[in-house]
Image (tube, rainbow, N blue to C red):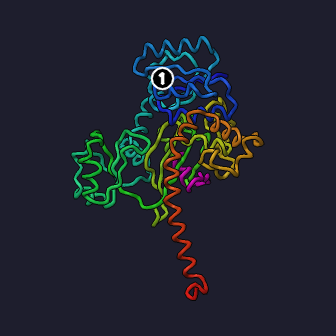
């Protein structure tokens, strides 16, 4: 089988490519934009087709050419621009496509305010929130009275935490949103800040029914997968309410004081940490390529409990997996290690890592001196 990965965001297309290689796909074509062009150097990409998602005629022609070359190929839309492109092309898409949300459902779940309203209508817990048309309509006194302080400001249609600001004072709001010339002026959601910890749901659904699901928390360099029946039922209820098909990531938060779970936003597409559940035995791309499920079957879940998020070169204890592990973790480690783009990201991050290490060293020295000073007999010395 040839897979044609369509996407414009390299942070999403790359993990889908890694998941494809982990499941043994050897023929992968990336149909992307200039941002994904770097992936043409990846050893796991047979070909990169440079596309313009705004040019429907050219995109249709390019996909028809790929269909002639690979008549059994399957199209995998990786991100929201790819899904929108396929919806605009409609019947001109010449190949089978993995499940994806309808255009109406996509626009609902990819908009933070519309997502909030859907959750309220479905009796799913979300923090109190309001929507404003732009940053100059933000009034701290009114928002503080309505939502309390702190509160969160975020664009309705951005992803990757872009534009998310936790506001703790009127000066915060002015400095980081209203008077910040780099902050966009589109519609905003203002939401009560939930004091607590983050938790995510990753899922794949078909016609509103969960086929694969996991919940996870990030703890340092580890991503830990847990079974949270309450949060999974929320995800299932949301999928049923929307009639959702395709992969999706949900952001949620557990309130520290009460233990209540609140849904924050949805990402109706693949996600940047897709390789983590794949390394633990649940490859959401592989699930997307399935065509049937046993009647009454429970959703698939990861086999392993946690996965290290750091680059393989920074994990000496796991180096044996590069040669000896023939399972999903070893496969993904080799995929990451030999991918030029991933190696480039690692190289770019090394200076910052070195600075943090140097900053910690004096603190460790100070801590050691304090321990010595309080050790038995230290005063006599």
Q: Nearer the viewer, residue 175 or 231?
A: 175
The N terminus, quarter of image: top right
Q: Position of residue 302 (x, y in %)?
A: 66, 46
Location of mark 1 (residue): 86
- Residue at 40% across, 21% down: 54
Q: Is residue 196 left or right of residue 73?
A: left
Q: Residue furthest front?
A: 381
Q: Position of residue 90 (x, y in %)?
A: 47, 19
Q: Nearer the viewer, residue 22 or 323?
A: 323
The C terminus, quarter of image: bottom right
- Residue at 64% across, 38% down: 337
- Residue at 27% across, 53% down: 173
- Residue at 54% across, 80% down: 373
Residue 225 painted magenta: yes
Q: Is residue 63 left or right of residue 84?
A: right
Q: Is residue 379 left or right of residue 253?
A: right
Please provide the residue range marked out in magenta: 219-235
Q: Position of residue 99 (x, y in %)?
A: 56, 30
User: Can residue 296 be spotted in the picture?
Assistant: no
């Amino acid at each position: 089988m040839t897979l044609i990965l369509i996407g414009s965001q390299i942070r999403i297309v790359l993990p889908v490519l890694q998941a494809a290689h982990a499941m043994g796909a050897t023929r992968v074509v990336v149909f992307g934009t200039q941002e994904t062009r770097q992936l043409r150097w990846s050893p796991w990409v047979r070909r990169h087709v440079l596309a313009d998602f705004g040019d429907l005629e050219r995109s249709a022609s390019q996909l028809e050419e790929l269909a002639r070359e690979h008549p059994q190929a399957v199209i995998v839309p990786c991100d929201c621009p790819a899904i929108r492109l396929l919806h605009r092309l409609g019947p001109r898409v010449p190949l089978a496509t993995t499940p994806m949300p309808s255009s109406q459902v996509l626009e609902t779940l990819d908009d933070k305010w519309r997502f909030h309203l859907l959750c309220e209508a479905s009796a799913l817990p979300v923090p109190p929130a309001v929507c404003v048309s732009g940053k100059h309509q933000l009034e701290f006194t009114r928002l503080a009275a309505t939502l309390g302080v702190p509160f969160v400001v975020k664009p309705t249609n951005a992803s990757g935490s872009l534009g998310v600001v936790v506001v703790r004072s009127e000066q915060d709001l002015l400095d980081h949103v209203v008077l910040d010339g780099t902050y966009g002026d589109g519609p905003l959601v203002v939401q009560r800040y939930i004091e607590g910890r983050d938790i995510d749901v990753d899922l794949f659904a078909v016609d509103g029914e969960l086929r694969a699901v996991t919940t996870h928390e990030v703890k340092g360099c580890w991503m830990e997968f847990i079974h949270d029946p309450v949060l999974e039922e929320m995800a299932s209820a949301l999928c049923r309410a929307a009639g959702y098909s395709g992969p999706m990531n949900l952001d949620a938060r557990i309130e520290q004081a009460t233990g209540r779970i609140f849904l924050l936003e949805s990402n109706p597409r693949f996600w940047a940490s897709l390789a983590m559940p794949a390394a633990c035995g649940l490859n959401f791309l592989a699930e997307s390529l399935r065509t049937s499920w046993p009647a009454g079957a429970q959703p698939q879940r990861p086999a392993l409990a946690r996965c290290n998020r750091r680059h393989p070169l920074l994990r000496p204890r796991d180096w044996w997996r590069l040669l000896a592990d023939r399972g999903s973790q070893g496969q993904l480690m080799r995929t990451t290690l030999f991918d030029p783009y991933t190696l480039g990201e690692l190289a770019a991050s090394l200076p910052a890592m070195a600075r943090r290490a140097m900053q910690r060293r004096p603190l460790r020295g100070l801590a050691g001196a304090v321990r010595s000073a309080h050790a038995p007999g230290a005063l006599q010395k």
